[in-house]
Image: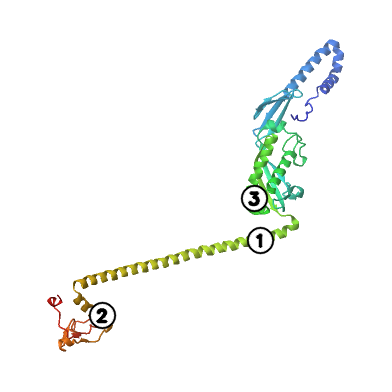
């Protein structure tokens, strides 16, 4: 188990005693040996009281304190308030801010005046399709287990970020972050990192980093992993920009084609439905017309079966009216001696005509058939 460096005693008892003896030496010379012993006891009591008084310490609202007696860690953490614990060298206390959100930058360094300095050896990584990409990352974390944070990881610290030796958020956190990020980037293509899957890469990097830190027992919790600048290296940046612009143009053309498709398809479907409806109407019309003609033929057939001669004569006359419209038709039967008999509609205009042409009269020499004659 890691033990933090032993702190120097806050009070050097020997040095204090020497100073007190030097101060009281003239007085003790006057009182003799007995007086010097009493004064020495009083001084020792005062020193012990002062030493015990130094055991008081304060824990602020955002802090927790971990205490150790003779090096043994007490898992009962001390919360905000005024506390007392055995002072050094018997006891040791570590007070840490646990609710503060801390920050680690990878691939760059920012300063107080707002300037940014790139760190290429941390940022350059190889993607899954063997391209090189420059990735800058920021993580936010906090302490979730103070005991694990203090005693589980021996870390050399990071003076650049003012991280003391022994704290796992020094080089341990930095190296673990770089390992997690390089693994996530190495599993993806350069297009995923540069454009479409940055959010997924951030989430995967956070989960992997938290797993590594939990395996170490670091006591740290990763709150957020945020990719800052993800770009190609400077020597090939122009070529990558051309590729990105080409892909943007490609997507624009695809979207235009899709928009044209969406505008044409409904119109084509409407035209197809209209043609289908017209064909269906034509179909129904032909079916009904054919059905009507079949029914009419059946009715004529029934009439023909009942009176063949009359039906035949009527059909003949109707056919002649259709063939020779507007012509006076005369039928002469030699067997009738040539006598003419006008029948059917007599073409006589009674003045009530609506202007429509009347059928021409038919004159025949055949005698008018009576029901008795047809029998």
Which of the two labelled residues, at mark 3 and mark 2, occupies the earlier sequence position? 3
Q: Which mark is residue 319?
A: 2
Task: In the displayed orientation, state which residue is furthest to the top.
Answer: 34
Instruction: Residue at 42% x, 68% y: name it.
Output: 275
Q: Residues within 10 Å of mark 2 (few under 14, many from 20)?
A: few
Whether residue 16 is situated above or below residue 125 in the rendered picture: above
Alpha-carbon distance for marks 3 and 2?
Answer: 88 Å
Foreground label between 1 and 2:
2
State if disc 2 and disc 1 touch (CB < 8 Å): no
Where residue 370 appears, as percent x and y from the top left, is 13, 78
**Considering the image in quadrants, where does the C terminus appear?**
bottom left
Instruction: Residue at 77% x, 40% y: name it.
Output: 159
SS type, badge 1: helix
Viewer-side residue, 335 vs 310: 335
Horizontal arrangement in the rendering, residue 231 relative to residue 336 (left or right): right
Tag 1 residue: 245
Quarter occupied by residue 2: top right
Q: Which mark is residue 198?
A: 3
Q: Which mark is residue 339?
A: none
Q: Residues within 10 Å of mark 1 (few under 14, many from 20)?
A: few
Which of the two labelled residues, at mark 3 and mark 1, occupies the earlier sequence position? 3
């Amino acid at each position: 188990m890691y033990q933090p460096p032993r702190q120097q005693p806050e009070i050097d008892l020997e040095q204090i005693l020497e100073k007190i003896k030097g101060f009281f030496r003239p007085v003790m010379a006057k009182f003799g040996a007995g007086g010097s012993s009493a004064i020495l006891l009083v001084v020792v009591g005062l020193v012990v009281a002062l030493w015990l008084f130094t055991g008081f310490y304060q824990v602020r609202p955002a802090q927790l304190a971990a205490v150790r007696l003779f090096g043994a860690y007490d898992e009962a953490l001390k919360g905000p308030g005024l506390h007392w614990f055995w002072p050094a060298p018997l006891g040791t206390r570590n007070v840490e801010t646990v609710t503060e959100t801390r920050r680690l930058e990878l691939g760059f360094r920012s300063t107080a005046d707002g300037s940014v300095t790139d760190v290429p050896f941390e940022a350059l990584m190889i993607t899954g399709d063997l391209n090189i990409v420059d990735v800058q990352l920021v993580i936010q974390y906090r302490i979730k287990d103070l005991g694990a944070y203090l005693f589980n990881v021996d870390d050399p610290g990071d003076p650049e970020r003012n991280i003391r030796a022994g704290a796992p958020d020094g080089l341990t956190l930095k190296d673990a972050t770089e390992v997690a990020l390089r693994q996530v980037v190495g599993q993806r293509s350069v297009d995923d990192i540069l454009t479409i899957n940055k959010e997924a890469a951030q989430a995967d990097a956070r989960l992997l980093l938290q797993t590594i830190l939990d395996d170490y027992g670091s006591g740290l919790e990763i709150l957020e992993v945020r990719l800052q600048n993800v770009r190609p290296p400077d020597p090939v940046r122009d070529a990558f920009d051309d590729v990105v612009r080409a892909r943007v143009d490609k997507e624009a053309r695809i979207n235009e084609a899709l928009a044209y498709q969406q505008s044409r398809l409904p119109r084509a479907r409407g035209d197809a439905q209209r043609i289908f409806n017209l064909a269906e109407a034509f179909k129904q019309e032909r079916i009904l017309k054919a059905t009507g003609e079949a029914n009419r033929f059946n009715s004529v057939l029934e009439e023909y079966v009942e009176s063949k001669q009359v039906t035949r004569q009527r059909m003949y006359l109707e056919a002649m009216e259709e063939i020779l419209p507007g012509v006076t038709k005369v039928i002469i039967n030699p067997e009738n001696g040539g006598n003419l008999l006008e029948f059917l509609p007599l073409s006589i205009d009674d003045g009530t005509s609506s202007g429509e042409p009347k059928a021409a009269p038919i004159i025949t020499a055949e005698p008018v058939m009576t029901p008795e004659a047809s029998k």
